Amino acid sequence: MQPATKLERRVVKAAEQALERQRYVSPLDVLTGMGWLPPGLVTDWRQGRAAHLEAVAAVSADRLADALEVFHRWVASRGLRPSEVEYVAATRDRRALRFTAGGEPALESAYRTHWMPADLPDKQRERITARQSKAPDLVVMQALRPYTCGGCGQTGAELLMMEDGAPICLTCADLDHLVFLPAGDAALTRRAKQASRLSAVVVRFNKSRKRHERQGLLVERAAVEQAEEQCLSDEEARARRRERDRQRREVADESFQQKLAEEIVRLFPGCPPTRAAEISLHTGARGSGRVGRSAAGRALDPDAVTRAVVASVRHENTSYDEMLMSGVPRDEARERIRPDIDRVLQAWRQP
């Protein structure tokens, strides 16, 4: 399939990146990659806080349908094989997630279908399908303010689950016998979860970042005790493994940042190499959440690399930061410095 329109180019680009990254591709991967489904709102949908996927999309249902049609033409041109996956919510009843407002069976099935290369071995195909069909973790939220339980009517102030748009206390959710294990020790968390017959992820909404962030787990008390004993027995071996892993990550980060700097110079040959290295180091820092650590950034996508360069120019070569400090609204400040950014980029595009 030779993409012609802007929509086709965007769909094909997102689909090919997902297929290369994970050996399968789904409509959800494509729409998320295009930016039409904000990841945070997709999480809300997966956790049962949205009635259907269309409700959290940044575009209309008709635009989603157009993208899905382009995606299926691309799938046919690549000769990919389908595999339908179960999508269930992270709620007590493990209800099936709905993609569309109308719930039309054929369209729902189209969203649930993942596509894999025809030459993918059957065992690998089965493993991928099983992994994608696995029920998600139950999710419990730390309350930001007192709430009234939709089940018993009592007022709660700590932990809750959301069910049909209403908060449910842990007693009504049958989770009140579990204990809270704070995040921080990956081995303890992993082992406690494995040993616990029932568990739930605890999250808290970060108002400044506008997203839910993981705080820990609810697990059985006996599972925590068992996990603590296991961690004490092999603490030295895990410390050595952590050090080896740290060294490998440093080598991988250095290699990636070098490639990113080379790509910046390729796109902007007039950019001084030292500046390209500074941009790469800043945007590619592990755990920074910046564009260089996004899926597109790690794939050295030209658009992502350009956004990283623009961000650097905005802060280092314009009066943008001073405007913000003086009280100029963000959108107005960006509009006023746009000519300055364009001048720098135009100069850097010249050898």
Image: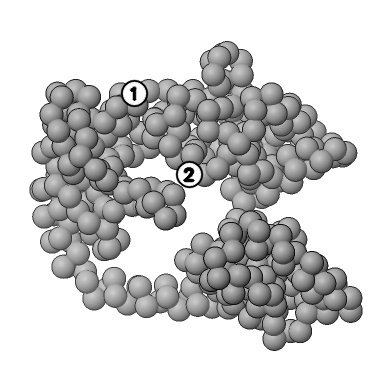
Per the rendering, the mark at residue 1 is none
In the image, residue 202 sits, relative to residue 348, either above or below, namely above
Three-letter amino acid code of the residue under disc 1? Asp
Per the rendering, the mark at residue 40 is 2
Crowd rating for badge 1 (residues with CA inside 10 Å; few <14, some 14–19, many 20+): few
What's the residue at 75%, 43% (across, down)? 10
Give the side of residue 197 with respect to residue 340, left or right: left
Foreground: 79 or 18?
18
Q: Is residue 271 shown to the viewer in this render?
A: yes
Q: Quadrant of the N terminus?
A: top right
What's the residue at 48%, 75% (across, down)? 248
Give the side of residue 290 with respect to residue 138, left or right: right
Q: CA distance from mark 1 to mark 2?
A: 19 Å
Residue 204 x, y percent position in the rendering: 31, 49
In the image, residue 174 sits, relative to residue 194, either above or below, namely above
Per the rendering, the mark at residue 164 is 1
Three-letter amino acid code of the residue under disc 2? Gly
What's the residue at 26%, 63% (across, down)? 185
Foreground: 316 or 73?
316
Residue 130 x, y percent position in the rendering: 46, 35
Q: Quadrant of the C terminus?
A: bottom right
Residue 126 x, y percent position in the rendering: 51, 35
In the image, residue 83 sits, relative to residue 10, either above or below, namely above
In the image, residue 9 sits, relative to residue 233, either above or below, namely above
Mark 1 residue element = loop
Mark 2 residue element = helix
Foreground: 133 or 217?
217
Question: Splitting the image into 4 quarters, where does residue 91 fall?
Answer: top left
What's the residue at 24%, 43% (across, down)? 145
Of callouts 1 and 2, which one flags the residue occurring earlier in the amino acid sequence?
2
Question: Splitting the image into 4 quarters, where does residue 242 fall?
Answer: bottom left
